[in-house]
Amino acid sequence: MQGTQIRPARPDDEERIRRFLAGLSLHTQTLRFFTGVSAPAAGLVRTLLALDERRDALVAITEGGEIVGHAMSFRGDCADVEVAVVVADQWQGRGIGPRLIDVLLLRASVRGARTVGMDVLGENRRVLRLVRRLWPDAEMKVTSGSVEVTAMIDPLSLFAEQGSVGTPLTA
């Protein structure tokens, strides 16, 4: 996490997000998107940067301004908010993913979300371990090679993790 900061995604991140996606290994692309995205389509890039009443998006950036992590949420069908996160291969294991989730859920909680959902490929053991650590009581349902996760958002712990910060990042 050191050497990075988290902020809301912006429309001027389009080229940076395109480079970020193209730089992900095929394995990481598949774990996040369930397919490879070596040449990201313009529609995908726009979706990843969209902020509106239904969607939120955050990026983790280096001091040099390069994107090394992306997280998004949207109003879900099975949960109040569904989330998806991806971190650049060389930045994985440094706490960026959990930090992106914390900030994203804090922002969603402020907007009234109480449950979180996500679809995780069954082979994504790292994320499934993270889910069990963050939400030991999460409901996990296996369907067609993926795991549908639904859990309660604990706003008190999210606010406590933010320390003395008064409000979550604002768009």
Image (spheres, rainbow, N blue to C red):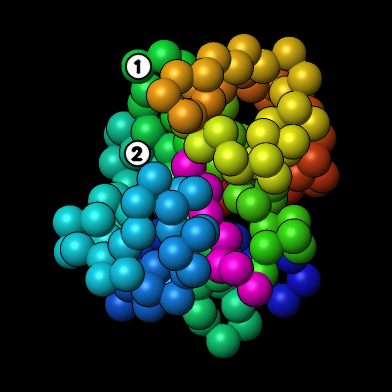
Q: Residue 11 or 94: which is nearer the viewer?
A: 94
Answer whether residue 12 is visible to the viewer in this image: no
Task: Please report whichever mark, 1 or 2, sits nearer to the chain's N-terminal start.
Answer: 2
Residue at 51% over, 81% down: 65
Residue at 44% x, 64% y is 26
Q: Position of residue 59 (x, y in %)?
A: 50, 61
Q: Which mark is residue 55?
A: 2
Instruction: Work out whether 4 lies above or below 141.
Output: below
Where is residue 141, by image quadrant? top right
Where residue 143 appears, as percent x and y from the top left, is 45, 19
Q: State the separation of the CA atoms marked 1 and 2.
A: 13 Å
The residue wearing badge 1 is 77
Q: Residues within 10 Å of mark 2 (few under 14, many from 20)?
A: some
Rendered residue at 32%/69% (across/down): 38
User: Bounds of the magenta span?
Assistant: 84-90
Q: Is residue 106 left or right of residue 45?
A: right
Quadrant in which the N terminus is drawn: bottom right
Visible residue check, residue 162:
yes
As drawn, the residue found furthest toward the bottom would be 64
